[in-house]
Image (cartoon, rainbow, N blue to C red):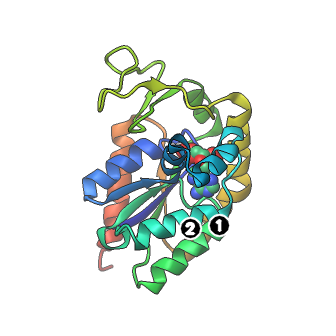
Amino acid sequence: MRVVVLGKQGAGKGTQSQRLAARFGVQHLSTGDLFREAARRGTADGREAQRYMDTGELVPDDIVVGVVRDQLEDNGLLGRGFVFDGFPRTLVQARALDGVLSAHRRPLHAAVHLAVPTEEVLDRLAGRRVCETCGAVYHVNLPPKHDWVCDLDGGPVVQRDDDTEPAIMRRLELYEEVTVPILDYYRGEGILLDVDGVGDGDEVFERMVEGVEARLSPSPS
Ligand code: AMP
């Protein structure tokens, strides 16, 4: 299964795409997690990416596409199947992904759009806390069981450096400007799957699974 998950920051992409990958036994890949990890390790790409991330700007397409291409071709994601989370974010990235996939005759099955109104994502982002090591997402109103230590792997649960008000506003602005056109692109390709991302997380997940399953085995009608 090859799927990308799109949506505003705070729409639940991280949580839902991790669950989707686990349900279908494929690899979850978040470009944001990759860049944060590279920044922590202090690699040249990581330091460069950090400059953009801190202010909510997008990392340049050539860096992003290079990183994803490596994962697809050298790290075996093409064969194993994947759920991409936070990629693609620009039309250039979407077209580059299509290029790699069609060269290998392995097109996307679906582009899932998790739709959540802006007022709601602002509320979620202001209280968002994440595990520094595995990326699990919590909220000040829904904290981990023990004293800001991740339930899954015991990592420290913190506020992301880029969850500041100016960076959040900039990311939302960029989403409208450069990511929304991708929705039309995938709609034109006939693979866009709009999923209502409001409400109980388990219900959102089931809606998403149902839609993806229908794409994997389309009914004969
Ligand atoms: P995320 O964890 O998906 O919210 O991404 C955090 C930050 O990483 C973004 O605000 C961007 O600076 C950068 N980033 C992640 N994915 C991409 C991408 N596909 N294109 C450009 N920048 C990205």
Specify the quadrant that holds the C terminus.
bottom left
Query: Which structural element holds mark 1?
Result: helix
Specify the quadrant that holds the N terminus.
bottom left
Q: Nearer the viewer, residue 112 or 86?
A: 86
Q: Mark 2, residues whose alpha carbon is within 10 Å: few (<14), some, or many (≥20)?
A: few
* Percent of width and height locating residue 141: 46, 18
Residue type for callout 1: Asp
Q: Is residue 116 above or below residue 104?
A: above
> Which residue lies at the image location 31% right of the left edge and 18% below the top edge?
145
> Which residue lies at the image location 32% right of the left edge and 70% below the top edge?
216
Residue at image mark 2: 66
Q: Nearer the viewer, residue 202 or 14?
A: 14
* Percent of width and height locating residue 15: 41, 42
* Percent of width and height locating residue 137: 43, 33
Query: Which structural element holds mark 2?
Result: helix
* Percent of width and height locating residue 165: 70, 29
Residue at image mark 1: 62
> Which residue lies at the image location 47% right of the left edge and 41% below the top edge?
12
> Which residue lies at the image location 37% right of the left edge and 63% below the top edge?
82
Mark 1–mark 2 contact, CB under 8 Å? yes
Disc 2 Cβ-to-ligand 1 distance below 8 Å: no
Q: Is residue 14 above or below residue 209?
A: above
Q: Total of numbered circles in the picture?
A: 2
Residue 151 horizontal side relative to residue 30, left or right: left
Instruction: Give the distance between the C-alpha atoms of the residues marked 1 and 2, in whole angstroms.
Output: 6 Å
Q: Is residue 41 above or below residue 166?
A: below
- Which label is found at residue 186? none
Q: Judge whether residue 2 can be spotted in this image.
A: yes
